[in-house]
Image: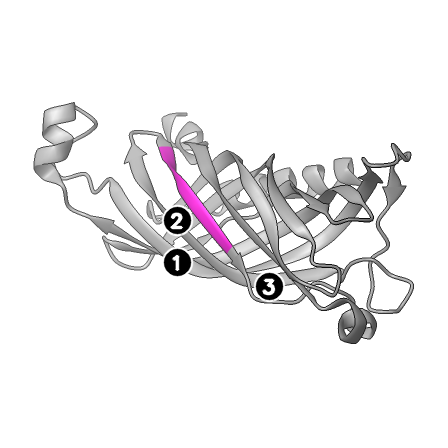
């Protein structure tokens, strides 16, 4: 299934390149890496620790004005964390297709650009972004490190027999630099949805995802312009 999802994302990127017009649409291939964990409130008093995880995807932006862009940042990524209490030590990993959508604003920093020779003097390379994201769970597993159990699949849904809700929702923030064909920055995800299945929330409490990491992206829409 993961291969189909990646192929679909790449197909969409190619389709966007074909409608690239008036220099308003930029398409980047991107990768991210960072620390992910969950905020938990449960009856077991679990201690949560972060894990490093990463993903691949795209940054797609459309200029509304010279400084303001609408952006979509679809990515296929893993989010992991450790959860421990007196009974268990769980190592959890969940795969998501995350689709952040929001806006980015570019700032004029002429002196900074000129001093570091990052681009033309009228280039707007520093940006701040904010928006919402929707996450769709595609796979997951967990192991109990205390008992060295083999990996078990996470069941997605909202019933008593499920382990995790199949969707996530929250806020997305990013900040960074555009340097020629590259886009480099930091990204923060703040989950707003309780991803404990709805039928189990009264018993098991709440669990909300959070993450912070870096990303690097390369503008592939330039390839079409150079031909």
Q: How is the image coloured?
A: one colour
The x and y percentages for residue 170 are 54, 63
Around disc 2, counting alpha carbons within 10 Å, would you say few (fewer than 14), some (14 to 19), or many (20 or more)? Answer: many
Residue that sits furthest to the left in the current view: 111
In depth, the one of 19 and 212 nearer the eye is 212
Boundaries of the magenta span: 183-189
Name above or below for residue 141 compared with residue 201: above
Report the side of 116 relative to 167 (left or right).
Answer: left
SS majority, magenta = strand
In depth, the one of 68 and 13 nearer the eye is 68
Around disc 3, counting alpha carbons within 10 Å, would you say few (fewer than 14), some (14 to 19), or many (20 or more)? Answer: many
The x and y percentages for residue 64 are 31, 59
Q: Quadrant of residue 123?
A: top left
Q: Quadrant of residue 5?
A: top right
- Residue with the mark numbered 1: 130
As measured in the structure, the alpha-carbon distance from the residue carrying label 2 to the one carrying label 1 is 6 Å
Q: Which quadrant holds the C terminus?
A: top left
> Sequence-wise, which precedes: disc 2 or disc 1?
1
* Residue in the image at 87% along x and 32% along y: 148
Which numbered disc covers residue 174? 2
Name above or below for residue 10 compared with residue 226: below
> Helix or strand or loop: what does disc 3 sit on?
strand
The x and y percentages for residue 72 are 49, 53
Residue 206 lies in the magenta stretch? no
Name above or below for residue 43 compared with residue 175: below
Which numbered disc covers residue 169? 3
For the image, the number of numbered tags is 3
Residue contact between numbered discs 3 and 1, judged by CB atoms under 8 Å:
no
The x and y percentages for residue 102 are 43, 60
Residue contact between numbered discs 2 and 1, judged by CB atoms under 8 Å:
yes
> Sequence-wise, which precedes: disc 3 or disc 1?
1
In depth, the one of 222 and 93 nearer the eye is 93
């Amino acid at each position: 299934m993961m291969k189909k999802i990646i192929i679909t994302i790449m197909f969409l990127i190619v389709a966007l390149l074909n409608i690239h017009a008036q220099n308003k649409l930029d398409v980047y291939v991107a990768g991210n890496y960072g620390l992910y964990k969950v905020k938990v409130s449960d009856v077991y008093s679990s201690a949560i620790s972060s894990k490093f995880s990463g993903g691949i995807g795209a940054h797609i932006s459309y200029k509304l004005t010279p400084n303001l862009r609408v952006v979509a940042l679809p990515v296929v990524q893993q989010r992991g964390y450790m959860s421990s209490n007196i009974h268990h030590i769980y190592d959890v990993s969940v795969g998501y297709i995350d689709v952040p959508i929001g806006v980015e604003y570019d700032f004029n920093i002429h002196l900074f650009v000129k001093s570091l020779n990052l681009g033309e003097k009228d280039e707007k390379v520093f940006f701040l972004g904010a928006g919402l994201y929707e996450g769709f769970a595609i796979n997951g597993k967990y192991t109990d490190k205390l008992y060295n159990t083999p990996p078990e699949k996470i069941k997605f849904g909202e019933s008593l027999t499920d382990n995790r809700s199949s969707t996530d929702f929250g806020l997305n923030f990013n900040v960074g630099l555009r340097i020629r064909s590259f886009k480099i920055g930091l990204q923060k995800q703040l989950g707003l949805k309780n991803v404990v299945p709805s039928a189990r929330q009264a018993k098991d409490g709440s669990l909300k995802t959070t993450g912070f990491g870096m990303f690097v992206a390369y503008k592939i829409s330039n390839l079409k312009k150079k031909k």
